[in-house]
Image: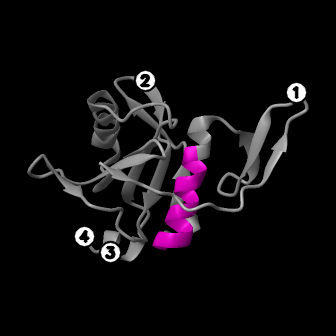
Amino acid sequence: MQALDLPPFEAKLTQSATNQPLIWDGLRRKHVVLTPEEWVRQHVVHYLIDHLGYPRGLLALERGLRYNQRQKRTDLLALNHQGQPLLLVECKAPTVPITAETARQATTYNQTIGAPLLLLTNGLVHYCWRVNFETRSNQRLAEIPPFEAAVGM
């Protein structure tokens, strides 16, 4: 476990007509409700783009997938240059600990998605793994790899 220590970013905040706090989501190009999980997701998006070189156009938020006849959504998915899954990110609110159950949820989603990198974060701590589907094993990484290193893995 390692502190993610996400650097601050210029968040564009506003309020809805019903006084709900909203944050501008540059990927979806709209304001979304500012939940604690959304705050973490927006920090991770900005960190990946601004500090690790992930191209904005290769990030997808809340992409749908089917698992066990149910419709699910990923929190964040980074794609490689060919449009294939590269990094699956599961975000939780800062008050939600990253547990074995959280890891199970993310790895279950990733069986359908097939991303070679998996990141679990609550904004305070994160776990990042490299997934080897052939050997059905995971290698814990000390940090989130920058985009160019990730595509070379």
Q: Quadrant of the C terminus?
A: bottom left
- Boundaries of the magenta span: 40-53
Which residue matches tag 2? 70
Q: Is residue 114 above or below residue 8?
A: above
> Do residues under tags 4 and 3 come within 8 Å of each other at their CB atoms?
yes
Residue type beneath disc 2: Arg
N-term-proximal mark, 4 vs 2 = 2
The one of 109 and 11 positioned closer to us in this rendering: 11
Q: Main secondary structure of the magenta part?
A: helix
Which residue matches tag 4? 153
From the top left corner, tell me how far across and down residue 36 is, in percent. Answer: 60, 36
Q: Residue at x 91, y 32 (%)?
A: 17
From the top left corner, tell me how far across and down residue 26 is, in percent. Answer: 69, 57
- Under circle 3, the secondary element is helix
Q: CA distance from mark 4 to mark 1?
A: 47 Å
- Under circle 4, the secondary element is loop
Residue type beneath disc 3: Ala
